[in-house]
Image (cartoon, grey):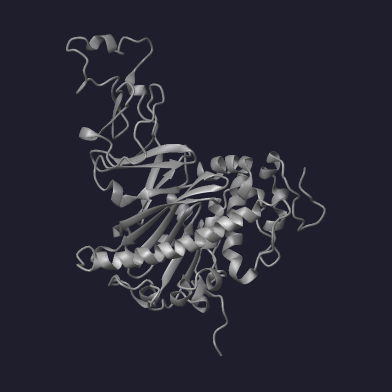
């Protein structure tokens, strides 16, 4: 072992050998109760070896948000997503049933659809651009190749006939399937051959968000950001508000530091909320679109902030939602897609576009402030002198929860964390 193990809370020396990334003792300082714990080892954010193991043990085993159900709302519509370094196609078959496949031709492994594809192809068929092997949206191989629309002279098709090939049956060469499911506005993918149900990972979130009818919320605006930082730093920044007064002076006026609560139950997520949501200032805010009329009680005046393990941020306010889909590209690089969604009552609002412009501008300001600071953290965490730091108990419990989820997966453990005793846990004492 290269990690120091002389005391219960000792921080490992740097660097750590790759074999130690799957050893429980490496994480002993983060496994302590949150009031005594230190942060996850710095190598978890900088090491290519850690990243390679994490990709297989976290992203290749969990349900990962790959896109939006609204983007696959009809047969032949599709989303192409990168999950754990694999390109995945999500589509609907001719019966409207959701299907997922590895984006790989069964002939010689050509990538079938480009990253920006929104339809599988004419007549709902997926054609390989190399040798025109063709599949339907159930994954069945239709032809090897299919000759429709080709320049092969009539009568010469038999030269390509695979039916006479020894030991070959195209029925055995359909697309390689991937598990898919939906919740709320999302489409999820799981690369495991026999995954646990998505519901087990979501925990109590469907119940907590039941009144929002999130299944009907749709994407309206999208932006992509290249982030020179590990995806976990993006997430850890999202799941705490300790930094608000110093990093987000504009946001701090509409999501006040003292109005925050922890908001999490059992499930593979971290959660917090701000209530009440303050009104816009000259710098902007979250007002504009009308609120969803079905909301009552605290839902009608709260912002819900949830990090869906492993890599998706979901913010739901009474009048809109904001999502960050984070794709880890390397230990120190993340591609982030930011998406604004609206509830169905906004569809016919003649002033919606102006309101969306304002919301997009405000979220872009907040997000750029976040990305600037997490890139600074990435720069600092790469310094070998830094071996980890102490948690700040009151505001960083969600980080401790998240980091222990990562550790569990690195060790091959399946554990869904429990939640707080109360629906909302206030972070500040009640005023006298």
Of residues 285 and 240, the one drawn nearer to the viewer in this rendering:
285
Quadrant holding the N terminus: top right
Of residues 219 and 250, the one drawn nearer to the viewer in this rendering:
250
Up the image or down, 315 lies above or below 81; here it is below
How many numbered discs, if any?
A: 0
Left or right of 2, for residue 308: left
Looking at the image, which residue is at 71% across and 57% down? 29
The extreme left residue here reads 154
Looking at the image, which residue is at 58% across and 61% down? 399
> Quadrant of the rendered structure where residue 130 is?
top left
Looking at the image, which residue is at 36% across and 15% down? 168
Quadrant holding the C terminus: bottom right
Residue 128 visible to an observer of this rendering: yes
- Where's residue 301, x and y in %? 38, 76
Up the image or down, 180 lies above or below 210; here it is above
Looking at the image, which residue is at 42% across and 66% down? 208
- Where's residue 64, x and y in %? 45, 48
Left or right of 377, for residue 101: left
- Where's residue 414, x and y in %? 57, 48
Up the image or down, 163 lies above or below 84; here it is above
Of residues 27 and 52, the one drawn nearer to the viewer in this rendering:
52
The extreme right residue here reads 6
- Where's residue 132, x and y in %? 29, 23
Residue 315 visible to an observer of this rendering: no
> Quadrant of the rendered structure where residue 276 is?
bottom left
């Amino acid at each position: 072992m290269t990690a120091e193990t002389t005391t219960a809370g000792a921080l490992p020396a740097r660097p750590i050998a790759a074999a130690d990334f799957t050893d429980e003792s490496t994480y002993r300082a983060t496994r302590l109760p949150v009031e005594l714990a230190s942060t996850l080892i710095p190598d978890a954010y900088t090491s290519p070896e850690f990243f390679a193991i994490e990709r297989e043990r976290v992203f290749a085993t969990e349900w990962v948000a790959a896109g939006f159900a609204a983007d696959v709302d009809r047969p032949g519509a599709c989303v192409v997503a990168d999950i754990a370094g694999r390109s995945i196609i999500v589509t609907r078959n001719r019966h409207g049933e959701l299907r997922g496949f590895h984006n790989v031709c069964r002939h010689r492994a050509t990538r079938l659809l480009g990253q920006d594809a929104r339809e599988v192809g004419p007549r709902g068929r997926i054609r390989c651009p190399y040798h025109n092997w063709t599949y339907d949206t159930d994954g069945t191989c239709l032809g090897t190749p299919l000759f429709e629309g080709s320049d092969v002279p009539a009568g010469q098709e038999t030269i390509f006939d695979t039916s006479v090939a020894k030991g070959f049956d195209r029925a055995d060469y359909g697309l390689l399937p991937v598990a898919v499911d939906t919740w709320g506005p999302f489409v999820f993918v799981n690369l495991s051959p026999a995954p646990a149900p998505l519901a087990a990972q979501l925990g109590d979130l469907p119940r907590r968000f039941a009144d929002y009818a999130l299944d009907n919320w749709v994407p309206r605006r999208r932006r992509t950001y290249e982030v020179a930082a590990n995806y976990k730093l993006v997430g850890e920044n999202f799941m705490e508000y300790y930094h608000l007064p110093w990093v987000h002076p504009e946001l701090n006026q509409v999501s006040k530091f003292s109005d925050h609560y922890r908001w999490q139950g059992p499930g593979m997520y971290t959660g917090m909320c701000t209530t009440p949501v303050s009104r816009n200032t000259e710098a902007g805010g979250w007002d504009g679109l009308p609120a969803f009329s079905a909301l009552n009680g605290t839902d009608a005046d709260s912002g819900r902030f949830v990090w869906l393990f492993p890599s998706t941020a979901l913010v739901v306010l009474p009048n809109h939602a904001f999502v960050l889909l984070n794709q880890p590209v390397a230990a120190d690089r993340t591609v982030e897609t930011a998406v604004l969604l609206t509830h169905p009552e906004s569809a016919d609002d003649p002033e919606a576009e102006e309101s969306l412009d304002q919301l997009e501008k405000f979220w872009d300001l907040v997000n750029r402030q976040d990305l600037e600071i997490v890139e600074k953290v990435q720069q600092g965490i790469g310094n070998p002198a830094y071996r980890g730091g102490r948690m700040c108990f009151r505001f960083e419990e969600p980080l401790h929860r998240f980091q222990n989820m990562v550790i569990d997966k690195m060790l091959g453990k399946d554990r869904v964390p429990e939640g707080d005793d109360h629906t909302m846990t206030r972070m500040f004492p009640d005023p006298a």
